Image (tube, rainbow, N blue to C red):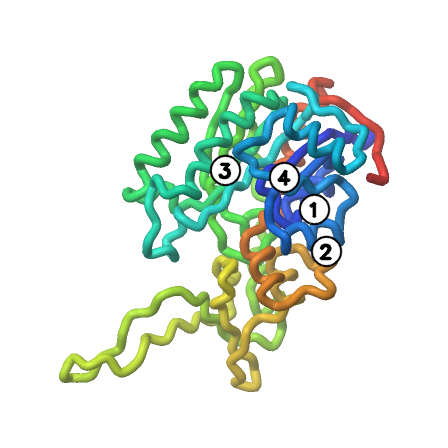
Amino acid sequence: MKKTWFRFATFYGGGGLGSWGTVKAGGIELFNIDNGSIQEKVYKKNFKAPYLKMDALKANCKTVNQELKKQGSKLVVKPGSTDLIILSSPCTSISRRNRLRHPFSKVNFLLLDCPRVIYDFKPKIAIIENVESILDKEMKPLLDLFLAKCRALKDYNFEWRILNAKDYNVPQSRLRFIVILVRKDVGKPVWPQKTTKDYKSLELRKVLPGIVAFDAGGSRKAVKDKNGNKVAKMDKWTPADRPVGTLTATGGEKFLDIRKKVRKPTIKERQILCTAQDMNFEGLKYNEAVEVLGNGIMPNFIKAVVENLAKQLLHKGRISRVKKSKA
């Protein structure tokens, strides 16, 4: 079957990990909206599509076209002209690692704005991605309001699920909250089957030989003496006979190697664990790479989700077919 290409855009696309996987699924990126300088640096090393450094809360067809024109692009975006939009708003105030998280912190309004973006741009398909801890009791007010906003999009069918990245050939046990919205004239959401059954090959010791244990970072319980005095923090080492836990943007993870040396994962090791090993991260500082990789959508994961949507919907001719572009 001849390759079908489709046009997509990303909001909060960061350094382009999600874009990398979507391109592998057959997409041509029109633009990426984010406002981070580090993210822009990584994105421009790997893509030629415009990086629109702007406030996504103010993004609509008019403002996006103005930014595209400033960059010398001849692309004109109209409602309904984008086949797929991927929105991955920041999770910092939803994540369990944030002790100060709150359902209605300022950053969470970016998630609540995603349905508005879909309403304005009217893509044929939209994918919204975030962390699964949005299902926690503390986050229920946010989840309820967000889902109500999705239901208010009367032209769309929508469903949500929790998916684990390791089921899609990613060597991380990483749960994600995924919402798929499909315009009613296109069809209904479809979900990918697991793309791997060989979980042995995803074990950390298989992916990175020489590593015998890992520490996922995060808070630890205090170790106290018989008098109740705090003397240390509990060790959190996990054997490397399983996929590594979620890699974060804060970079608290540590490895124990066969030399009994405790160290941080290298940038290249983090790329491998995120399935972004073929992306260009040259010249980045360690903390810059950690931030981009920790916040990005794993390419293998989003590829599986998008590829399935393409396979199930593109054959009907309902999503635009465009020629492959060097851009």
Q: Residue at x 44, y 70 (%)?
A: 238
Q: How far apart in space, not on screen, are marks 1 and 2 (Cα)?
A: 8 Å
Q: Which mark, by number, is residue 33?
A: 4
Q: Amino acid at mark 1?
A: Trp
The answer to whether 264 is drawn above or below residue 142 in the figure is below
Q: Earlier in the sequence, mark 3 or mark 2?
A: 3
Q: Which residue is mark 3?
A: 178
Dot 4: what SS? strand
Of 55 and 286, the residue lying toward us: 55
The answer to whether 271 is drawn above or below residue 263 in the figure is above
Q: Earlier in the sequence, mark 3 or mark 1?
A: 1
Q: Residue 268 placed where, x, y %?
A: 67, 66
Dot 1: what SS? helix
Q: Which residue is mark 2?
A: 279
Q: Residue 278 placed where, x, y %?
A: 74, 57
Q: How far apart in space, not on screen, are marks 2 and 4 (Cα)?
A: 19 Å
Q: How far apart in space, not on screen, are marks 3 and 2 (Cα)?
A: 24 Å
Q: Earlier in the sequence, mark 2 or mark 4?
A: 4
Q: Residue at x 50, y 72 (%)?
A: 254
Q: Which residue is mark 1?
A: 20
Q: Are marks 1 and 2 in contact (CB under 8 Å)?
A: yes
Give the number of the mark in front: 2 or 4.
Answer: 4
Q: Residues within 10 Å of mark 4 (few under 14, many from 20)?
A: many
Q: Amino acid at mark 2?
A: Met
